[in-house]
Structures are given as C-alpha cells and as structure tokens.
Image (cartoon, helix red, strand yellow):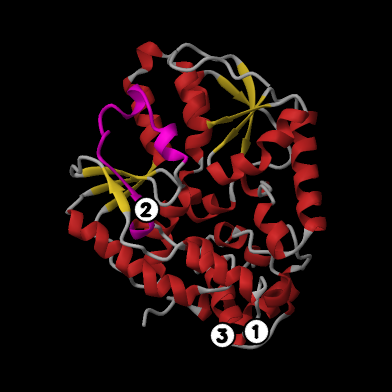
C-alpha cells in the first residue's frame, strides 16, 4: 500500500506554520497552529480534523512541500472522521468507478486529458488546439480521483490512481496536457507525495494555453475588458502554475481587477461546502466572493473548472457579470468566439 511521504521534523522547525495560520476557515495564531499540526502529525486528535472544510488551501500555504492537507485527510480517514454522510460518499465513489467505457481520439505522444468532465469535449475547439487534437482521452479509466480528498478518503485514491497511471502507460504517451487542474494536481503533486511513478510529463493546460497564444500572437486582438478569476480549490495543488492566469490575461489584453479574494486569498465556488458543511457556509462564501467581484467592477468572471462554472454562472450573471470559461475568453481574443451576453 502506498504511504504519504510526510516529514514531521519540517513541521517542528517551521518558522511560520502558515498551513494553519493562513487558513480562512479556522482562526489560529502561530503557537496554537504549531501545537495542532504536531498533534495531527503524531496521530493524535485535533479540532482541526473536525473543522477543516477541505478547501485545499494549506497545501499551497505550506512552502516546505510537506502536504499538510493530505496528512489531515489521512488522519481523518484513520480516525473515522467523516466529512459527509456515508451515503453521499458512497455515491461519489460509485460515480468514479471504472466501467471499461472510455473515449480516445487519435492518440499521439502528446495527448489532451479531459479526465471525467464531458464539458471539455465541447470547450476544446479551434486553433488553440490544432497542434494536438484529435489526440485526447476521456472517461473513468483516466479519472484522477482527487475529488475524494474532499471526502477524507485516500484509500480509494491509493487503489485507483495507480490503475489510472497504468492506463496512461499502456497508451505509451510522453506528455499529457491536463485540461482539469485537479488531474494535473494528481500527477504533479498527489502521486509523487505517495511515491507513485508517473510515466509521462504532466502539463497544466494554463501553460499550454499560454504557449499557444504566444504562437498565435499575430491573431490576438486585445479584449480591453475587466475580469475576475474564479480560482477553484483544485488549483491549490498546482499553485506553481497560478502565475499563468495573469500571464494569459496580459497576452489577451484583459485586466485582472484588484480584489480581496484572489491569489492565495481566493474563495472556492462553495459547491462542495454546501454538500459537506451545509447551506450557511456555501451561502456565505458565495456571497462574499461575488460581492467582491461586483465591488471591483469586473465585467467578466472567467472560470478554470467547469464544475465551478456550473455552480456560479447564473449567480454572477444575475449581478451583471458575464460568465465565461478561460478557454472561450482566449478564443474571443483570436476572433473565434463572440462577446458573451449576460
């Protein structure tokens, strides 16, 4: 069985304990934060194990690469501290169960991975993807299973993720462009944290988009719009790629508005919060987030994750902000998509 690579000494000598001090949902000073993370690392109970809302934020806040959120998830499972009713957890596990049914295009050495999100079958269109399409894969056999850390279930990930990696190995691909950053997080963060060998080079699709836009720079017409980015929880697992958000906006002439809930201080879409913690937390997070977009005079809210887009599109549109996926925003800049109507 795969085991989490966690170094307790890194926590003992950490000068900031940012993993918990920066948490937006639990209020701790440095001394109490160190006390609690050391309890968890030693297998003891801590109120953090009961109060964590699974935003993934501590994975980004820890600059020592010691995976505090994976540790919290491991300890929750070992102690039977559920984040959701068993029926809901079981339902989600069943959704991702491999069925032997998947789609592949004309597989080349570089492939686009849609994971298990059908929305990408429609989003990935036009010149931005001419150099790789129709080399793609989609289906449960290639589903990263990272979502189960929301449900304090690393056991199912340790069971399924090696099979997913082996499915890629059988395709003999060298590079995988992950169209969902949760998949990128699985291959670049989660798998290495558990000692799983990744048989290809994972590429975050933000990096891919940035490079394609530079190749198509002569076709870009600056959008001259103000935009707010809805950062998903999954991007906390690939924070080293977050800079591409600003890089891409600069290329396409879109102004990232200055607002409170951005970058490390970003708020999730709230969908999982509603399922795990109830209506009140979801409503609070969504209200603060969207009001912040309105106060910053954003004209567009652009999304990374299709699940976030499904959750918030109607809500931001009601506030007069145009919802759009980052891919479609880029296609607008090269003249392939019309301006979004509210």
Residue position for label 3: 78
Measuring from the top left, give residue 22's x and y in whole percent: 69, 59
Q: Which residues are magenta?
A: 119-141
Label 2 vs label 1, nearer the camera: 2
Label 3 vs label 1, nearer the camera: 3
**Image quadrant of residue 34?**
bottom right
Taking 108 as reference, is 255 left or right? right
Q: Is residue 244 above or below residue 220?
A: below
Residue position for label 1: 39
Taking 324 as reference, is 166 left or right? left
Q: CA distance from mark 3 to mark 1?
A: 14 Å
Q: Residues within 10 Å of mark 2 (few under 14, many from 20)?
A: many
Residue 145 visible at all? yes
**Image quadrant of residue 179?**
top left
Describe the element under mark 1 as helix, strand or loop: helix
Q: CA distance from mark 2 to mark 1?
A: 39 Å
Q: Is residue 110 above or below residue 92?
A: above
Labels 3 and 2: the sequence-earlier one: 3
**Image quadrant of residue 226?**
top right
Taking 80 as reference, is 202 left or right? left
Labels 3 and 1: the sequence-earlier one: 1
Describe the element under mark 2 as helix, strand or loop: strand
Labels 2 and 1: the sequence-earlier one: 1
Measuring from the top left, give residue 306's x and y in whole percent: 54, 42
Residue position for label 2: 139
Residue 13 visible at all? no
């Amino acid at each position: 069985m795969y085991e989490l690579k966690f170094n307790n000494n890194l926590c003992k000598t950490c000068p900031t304990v940012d993993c918990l001090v920066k948490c937006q949902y639990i209020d701790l000073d440095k001394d109490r934060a160190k006390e609690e993370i050391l309890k968890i690392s030693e297998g003891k109970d801590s109120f953090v194990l009961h109060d964590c809302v699974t935003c993934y934020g501590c994975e980004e806040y820890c600059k020592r690469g010691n995976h505090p959120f994976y540790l919290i998830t491991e300890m929750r499972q070992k102690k039977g501290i559920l984040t959701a009713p068993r029926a809901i957890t079981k339902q989600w596990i069943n959704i991702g169960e491999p069925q032997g049914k998947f789609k592949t295009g004309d597989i080349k050495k570089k492939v686009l991975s849609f994971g298990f999100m059908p929305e990408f079958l429609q989003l990935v269109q036009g010149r931005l993807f001419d150099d790789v399409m129709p080399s793609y894969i989609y289906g449960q056999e290639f589903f990263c299973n990272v979502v189960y850390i929301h449900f304090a279930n690393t056991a199912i990930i340790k069971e399924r993720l090696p099979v997913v990696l082996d499915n890629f190995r059988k395709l003999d691909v060298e590079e995988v462009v992950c169209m969902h950053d949760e998949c990128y997080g699985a291959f670049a963060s989660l798998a290495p944290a558990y000692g799983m060998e990744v048989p290809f080079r994972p590429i975050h699709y933000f990096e891919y988009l940035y490079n394609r836009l530079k190749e198509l720079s002569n076709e870009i017409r600056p959008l001259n719009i103000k935009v707010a980015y809805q950062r998903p929880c999954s991007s906390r697992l690939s924070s080293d790629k977050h800079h591409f958000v600003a890089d891409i906006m600069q290329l396409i002439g879109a102004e990232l508005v200055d607002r409170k809930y951005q970058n490390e201080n970003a708020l999730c879409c709230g969908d999982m919060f509603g399922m795990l913690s109830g209506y009140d937390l979801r409503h609070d997070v969504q209200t603060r987030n969207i009001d912040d977009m309105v106060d910053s005079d954003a004209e567009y809210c652009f999304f990374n994750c299709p699940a976030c887009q499904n959750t918030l599109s109607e809500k931001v549109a009601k506030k007069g902000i145009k919802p759009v996926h980052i891919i479609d925003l880029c296609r607008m800049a090269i003249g392939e998509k019309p301006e979004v109507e509210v």
